[in-house]
Amino acid sequence: MEEIDVPPFFICPISLEIMTDPVTVPTGITYDRESIEKWLFSGKNTACPVTKQVIADCELTPNHTLRRLIQSWCMLNACHGIERIPTPKPPISKAQITELLNDAAKSPLHQIKCLRRLQSIASENATNKRCMESSGAVEFLASIVSNYDPTAVDGLLYNEFEPIRPTDEALNILYNLHLSEAALKNLMRKNGDIVVSLTRVMQRGTCKSRAYAVSLLKSMLEMADPMQLICLRHELFVELVRVLRDRISQQASKATLQLLVSVSPWGRNKVRVAEAGAVPVLIELLLCSSQKRACETILTVLDEVCRCAEGRSELRNHGAGLAIVSKKILRVSHVANQRAVRILLSISKFCATSNVLQEMLQLGIVAKLCLVLQVECGHKTKEKAKEVLKLHARVWMNSPCIPSNLRSSYPASS
């Protein structure tokens, strides 16, 4: 393509490329639709990139005049290698969404057709997704999930030999809508049983629907208020642990671990996590995990759960519990070091039987803590390691299990 001067007002201020679908925001600045949608919706920004003014109304107005100018300019410069820009498909309207939702009530076949159409609309652009949010589509989809019945066969449709379950379709759409914070909060507030419904899906649903359910739960509970988090049921934690145990997908495991990190500190949730059998599953995941972020998240959940007696007991009674926690120290990251040493501190403070203390010596945990004091791994981590060593200095300090080059690091007991 030959060198050619492009009129500056054809250029998107974000992408710095020629606009293919120019839209104007309420501040009066025009951007390419894809770029400003990504900025406002995916990036969760609220200010105009150029003026820095807050955009209260995210309505994007197509700039047809500018688009026609750009198209004409492209045609005039086709000989220079400039490709013609096609006329973009207009975004969906609220009236069209409302009509679609009304048609869904006519029959199971109409409902499936509606769900498929909604999926197609959502996949086109972020503006369509936000339009669906404001047109009642989220509430419609949530009602399908709330009415989930895994035993229902009446009216079930089939695609070749596979049943088409409305709940699976609805969850797929809800997940891919990437709901805004406001929509997630409304979902929790208006559909009080949505967490219970998603738990039912996780109990009896397909692997795909279970993965969508846990990802949606993660997004919702991150927006929940403390009272909602305190009231979570035991059955939810049982299903979260089962998702981890079944390893249905890497994405589902990641979402589950992040969810446990966010909800465990509230109320008795750490006890519920332990009672659901999470500790053995987390240890097994840690044994086979080499990814930095995964190890950090698993250790963070274990650290939180070990703040209750039930969690500490589960860790102590697992044959590989103390060994794998110790092994991750100085092998993953500063964050992992801190979490692992805090877990060992919890065990040392509240479970320090003679057998446990001897096991920590024989596994090389005491020597590892002495090594922590010699290397650069963060002040807080060193202080916690020092606290563990001081707690049981009488038992450990002169043990032959500690190499002589590390024994000099052993802190004097206070």
Image (cartoon, helix red, strand yellow):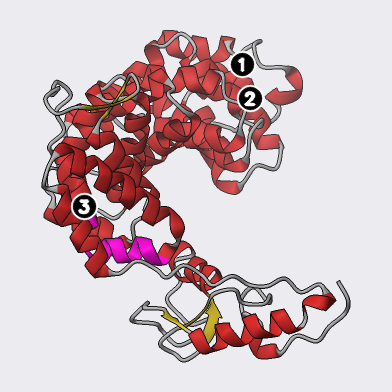
* Residue at the (34%, 41%) spot, across then down: 172
Determine whether, in the image, residue 320 is placed left or right of residue 242: right
Q: Residue 259: percent from the left, percent from the top?
A: 36, 40
Query: Within 10 Å of the Cα at label 3, are there few (<14), some (14-19), or many (20+) other Cα atoms?
Result: few
What is the magenta range? 127-137
Q: Can residue 49 be seen in the rendering of this structure?
A: yes
Using the image, determine if residue 195 lies above or below residue 236.
below
Q: CA distance from mark 1 to mark 3?
A: 41 Å
Q: Residue 19: percent from the left, percent from the top?
A: 61, 77
Check contact, mark 1 vs mark 2: CB within 8 A: yes
Determine whether, in the image, residue 383 is placed left or right of residue 107: right
Residue tagged by mark 1?
Answer: 364
* Residue at the (35%, 37%) spot, across then down: 212
* Residue at the (21%, 52%) spot, across then down: 226
The mark lying in front, picked from 1 and 3, is 3
Check residue 48 for magenta coloring: no
Please state which of residues 260 and 52 is positioned toward the viewer in this rendering: 52
Check residue 130 for magenta coloring: yes
Hey, what amino acid is under mark 2?
A: Lys
Residue 137 is marked as none
The part of the image, by quadrant, that contains residue 396 is top right
Residue tagged by mark 2?
Answer: 368
Quarter occupied by the N terminus: bottom right
Please state which of residues 25 and 2 is positioned toward the viewer in this rendering: 2
Q: CA distance from mark 3 to mark 2?
A: 38 Å
SS category of the residue bearing label 1: loop
Determine whether, in the image, residue 307 is placed left or right of residue 152: right
* Mark 1 / mark 3, whichever is N-terminal: 3
